[in-house]
Amino acid sequence: MQSTSDEYSLKKIIHVDMDAFYASVEQREQPDLIGRPVIVAWPSKRSVVCAASYEARSFGIHSAMPASRAKKLCPDGVFVPPQFDLYRQISNEVKSVYRKYTDLIEPLSLDEAYLDVTRNKPEIPSATEIAQRIKTEIKQVTDLNASAGVGPNKFIAKIASDWNKPNGICVVKPKEVLNFISTLPVRKIPGIGPATEISLKNKNIRIVSELACISEVQLVNWYGKFGKRLFNLARGIDLSPVNNNRIRKSLSFETTFEQDKTLAEIEPELLPLTEKIWNQLGAKNLQANTFYLKLKTHDFKNTTRSKTSPKPVRSLHELIMLVQHLLYKSRLPKNLRYRLIGIGASNFVQPNASGDQPRLL
Ligand SMILES: [Mg+2]
């Protein structure tokens, strides 16, 4: 563990995360929504919540929850459809603030990015000061709040930005890293979803300090390659660089079930994933010609079904139809049980670049 202290001191990473981004933008655009529970969701009975204002969160509403459930929790909530063009435009304004300090920027989504400020353009030695300036300038330019985490690597910075939300800042110095993460629930580690959380809980591992007691060999035995990463993260070590030129060739989301499901039981799980893909494509201003459905059987065998259309899919409805087609029309064995489903998109085109039709709401 001692040998990592040099690695800690090597880098200064900031993770910036806009607070309740889509919902805050809607409140900024319509000031009568300020102070009210705003829920950003597509206007369909079966859709899921894209974002919720802090007022809506106090009713227990959170993103990825079915919109129908949000409506039950908060009947007086204001439901608005997402406006990705606007979110993207604001995201670009925020990025130009980052660029005053560094070009080493890795966006994670429209409202989140890692910045490597180890060396920065104004040559400010304190990453904390840079984070404070960035927060202030984002507010000046966009009238929106952001939270920032400062740490010696991406993992720590990301956990830290969540610490004092909203409108907060949290700085974790290299020597504070182990203390900072020791009592953290393992679920907070990026890559640990509900299924891995349960698997660890069954082994009596609930918090990071308990995870840090497990040998690397054991973790690799349990979780393969991810086990090696877990071994490092449990020690606060993350050597992954801030990557500013990631070109996406595909995009995918998956869900691992707590209990294996039949094909019929899988259908309701598909809609949230379909919307997630659709929203991410919108956020990145991409359209896709190919979509695929991935299923992992109870005995860990992967099956993939894909469909390539001559024209990009242009509406969420069209995409839902396509995904259902993949599920029902592609002769998947009905008697099997599945432990994971995923939906992916590839074969991207930039809308409007070649006279393509814009996407529809
Ligand atoms: Mg955010």
Image (cartoon, helix red, strand yellow):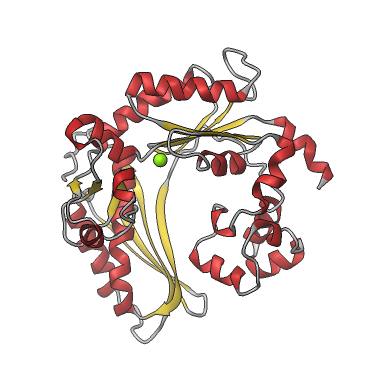
Q: Nearer the viewer, residue 128 or 245?
A: 128
**At x 73% / y 68%, what residue is drawn?**
218
Q: Is residue 187 visible?
A: yes
Q: In the figure, is residue 347 to the left or right of 187?
A: left
Q: Image quadrant of ligand 1? A: top left
Number of numbered discs visible in the structure rendering: 0
Q: Is residue 331 above or below residue 93?
A: below
Q: Is residue 172 left or right of residue 109?
A: right
**x and y percentages locating residue 101 in the rendered image:** 53, 19
Residue at 33%, 73% in the rendered image: 266
Vertical order, 296 against 105 (above or below)? below
- Tell me if residue 287 can be seen: no
Q: Residue at x 49, y 37 (%)?
A: 246
Q: Position of residue 70 (x, y in %)?
A: 25, 58
* Residue at the top extreme, as displayed: 122
- The residue at 63%/66% (across/down) is 223
Q: Residue furthest bottom?
A: 335
- Viewer-proximal residue among 171 and 346: 171
Q: Residue 129: give x, y in percent of width and height.
A: 57, 21
Is 198 left, or right, of 76 in this rendering?
right
Q: Position of residue 168 (x, y in %)?
A: 48, 34
